[in-house]
Image: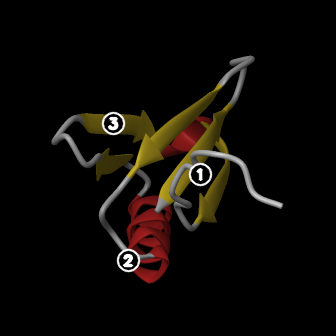
């Protein structure tokens, strides 16, 4: 899944490619928002992204699409 996180007072969004399903990501975001702590996600290479939930503007969850190579008609 491609996950994009908008952060308050930041012109760029955080983008992470995760092995989790959209339902799993949504559950993590919802749990983090109710706990009031931080949202922690791990990408496919094992890197962790930690964001304080009080700074999150939005979270966009989209299916990863493989890059297309070549020409098609």
The x and y percentages for residue 29 are 47, 63
Badge 3 element:
strand
Dividing the picture into quadrants, the one containing residue 55 is: top right
| Gap between marks 2 and 3 measured at Cα | 16 Å
Badge 1 element:
loop
- Residue at 57%, 46% (x, y): give it: 69
Report crowding for label 2: few under 14, some 14 to 19, many 20 or more residues within 10 A (C-alpha): few
- Residue at 29%, 46% (x, y): give it: 43
The x and y percentages for residue 2 are 52, 54
Q: Nearer the viewer, residue 44 or 13?
A: 44
Question: Quick check: 19 above or below 47?
Answer: below
| Gap between marks 1 and 3 measured at Cα | 27 Å
The type of colouring in the image is secondary structure
The x and y percentages for residue 4 are 59, 46
Residue position for label 2:
24
- Residue at 42%, 36% (x, y): give it: 51
Residue position for label 3:
49
Q: Earlier in the sequence, mark 2 or mark 3?
A: 2
Residue position for label 1:
68
Report crowding for label 1: few under 14, some 14 to 19, many 20 or more residues within 10 A (C-alpha): few
Q: Earlier in the sequence, mark 1 or mark 3?
A: 3
Q: Nearer the viewer, residue 36 or 1?
A: 1
Image quarter in which the C terminus is found? bottom right
């Amino acid at each position: 899944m491609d996950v994009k996180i908008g952060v308050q007072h930041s012109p760029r969004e955080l983008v992470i490619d995760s092995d989790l399903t959209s339902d799993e990501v949504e559950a993590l975001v919802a749990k983090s928002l109710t706990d009031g702590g931080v949202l922690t996600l791990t990408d496919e290479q094992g890197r962790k992204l930690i964001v304080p939930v009080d700074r999150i503007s939005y979270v966009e969850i989209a299916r990863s699409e493989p890059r297309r190579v070549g020409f098609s008609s």
